């Protein structure tokens, strides 16, 4: 029996959270508050973990067998839990790529498996979408589901 079978899922709530995640990502990218990539995220969390307000770990079914990626995810999840960083697992890599657009011409393909949304100490960035996602993460922790999952829907 999986956690999803034990914890009832409200599809309208999941849809609202998915849409909030999308709004947060688009706004964060536009405001240069988005760090993309496992390595880049690890570097930022090592230097300034207090600036990170949300960590998204993204996979699709084909990534489930990637042991190295799962080890990275486990370490990142532990770090986020220790540093009170909201964390969310998302599926829908194609939707994620569509939301964030193509990397600049000539640049290497982006690693979309880990995304960090930052909130610099000097600016009180408020986002309704971020508040919705944070609330969902807190509710999930209250149900002992420490890393909730959301599916991004292709549109």
Image (cartoon, grey):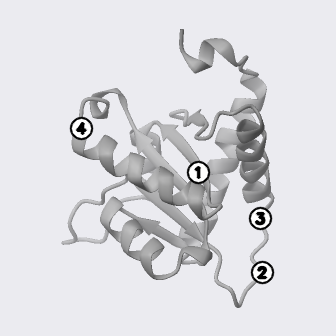
Instruction: Choose mark 3 or mark 4, whichever is in front.
Output: 4
Is 60 displayed left or right of 150 in the figure?
left
Question: Crowdedness of circle 1 by 10 Å Cα count: few (<14), some, many (20+)?
Answer: many
| Disc 4: which residue | 67
Marks 1/4: CA–CA distance: 20 Å
Pointer 3 or 1: first along the chain: 1
Marks 1/2: CA–CA distance: 20 Å
Marks 4/2: CA–CA distance: 38 Å
Is 127 displayed left or right of 86 in the figure?
right
- Residue at the location (43% across, 44% down)? 58
Pointer 1 or 4: first along the chain: 4
Instruction: Choose mark 4 or mark 2, whichever is in front.
Output: 4
**Observer-nearest of 112 and 98:** 112
Pointer 4 or 2: first along the chain: 4
| Disc 1: which residue | 87
Instruction: Choose mark 3 or mark 1, whichever is in front.
Output: 1
Question: Crowdedness of circle 2 by 10 Å Cα count: few (<14), some, many (20+)?
Answer: few
């Amino acid at each position: 029996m999986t956690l999803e079978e034990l914890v009832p899922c409200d599809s309208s709530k999941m849809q609202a959270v998915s849409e909030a995640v999308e709004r947060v990502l688009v706004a964060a990218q536009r405001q240069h508050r988005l760090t993309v990539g496992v390595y880049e995220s690890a570097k930022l969390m090592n230097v300034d973990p207090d600036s990170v307000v949300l960590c998204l770990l993204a996979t699709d079914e084909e990534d489930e067998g990637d042991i190295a990626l799962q080890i990275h995810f486990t370490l990142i999840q532990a770090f986020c839990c220790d540093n009170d960083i909201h964390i969310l697992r998302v599926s829908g890599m194609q939707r994620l790529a569509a939301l964030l657009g193509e990397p600049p011409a000539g640049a290497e393909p982006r690693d979309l498996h880990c995304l960090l949304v930052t909130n610099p100490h000097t600016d009180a960035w408020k986002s309704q979408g971020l508040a919705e996602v944070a609330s969902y993460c807190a509710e999930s922790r209250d149900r002992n589901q420490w890393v909730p999952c959301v599916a991004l829907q292709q549109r």
